[in-house]
Amino acid sequence: MRYLLDTHALLWARAAPALLSEEARTVFESNDTTLYVSMATLWECAIKRSIGKLELPDNFFEIIADDYEVLGIEISHLVAYAELPMHHRDPFDRLLVVQAQLGDLTLLTRDPNIARYDVSIMVA
């Protein structure tokens, strides 16, 4: 299986795995999964770190790049994003939705607004 991690799922997996659902912890422990982190998630983390809302180790982005598949932002994502219904106002989460849809990925999240979209979800 292939999973795209919402920001909170990534942060919990790294710093507080007990916060993840049992099903999500199983995903992280499995050898049969590919875990993706969007460049949008990394950008969100960088923004939050720069304004003092998130503490990250100095080498956080390098660690993530080594441990996960980093999913870039493509033109096809932006085209789909522009057509996405406004069920959710968070631009980063909306981008994750289209990346999951176009990449046939399951989005690992606890955000109830994301469930309003036609996207495969697993509770983080």
Image (cartoon, rainbow, N blue to C red):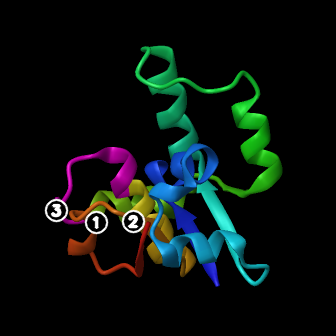
Relative to the observer, which residue lies in front, 54 or 96?
A: 54
- Residue 95 image-quadrant placement: bottom left
Task: Single out the mark in the foreground, 1 or 2.
Answer: 1
The type of residue carrying mark 3 is His
Kindly identify which numbered label has been placed on residue 97.
Answer: 2
Q: Earlier in the sequence, mark 3 or mark 2?
A: 3
Separation of marks 1 and 2 at Cα, in angstroms: 7 Å
Name the residue carrying label 3: 87
Q: Are marks 1 and 2 in contact (CB under 8 Å)?
A: yes
Name the residue carrying label 1: 114
Magenta range: 84-94
Against 122, residue 36 (above or below) is: above
- Badge 3 crowding class, 10 Å Cα cut-off, few under 14, some 14 to 19, many 20 or more, is few
Relative to the observer, which residue lies in front, 11 or 105?
A: 11
- Residue 81 image-quadrant placement: bottom left
Label 3 secondary element: loop
Pick the quarter of the image with the N terminus.
bottom right
Q: Is residue 90 magenta?
A: yes
Answer whether residue 94 is visible to the viewer in this image. Answer: yes
Q: Earlier in the sequence, mark 1 or mark 2?
A: 2
Label 2 secondary element: helix
Q: Is residue 74 magenta?
A: no
Q: Earlier in the sequence, mark 3 or mark 1?
A: 3
Query: Where residue 7 sits in the image (x, y, percent)?
Result: 47, 48
The type of residue carrying mark 2 is Val
The residue furthest top is: 51
Locate residue 82 relative to residue 58 in the image: left or right: left
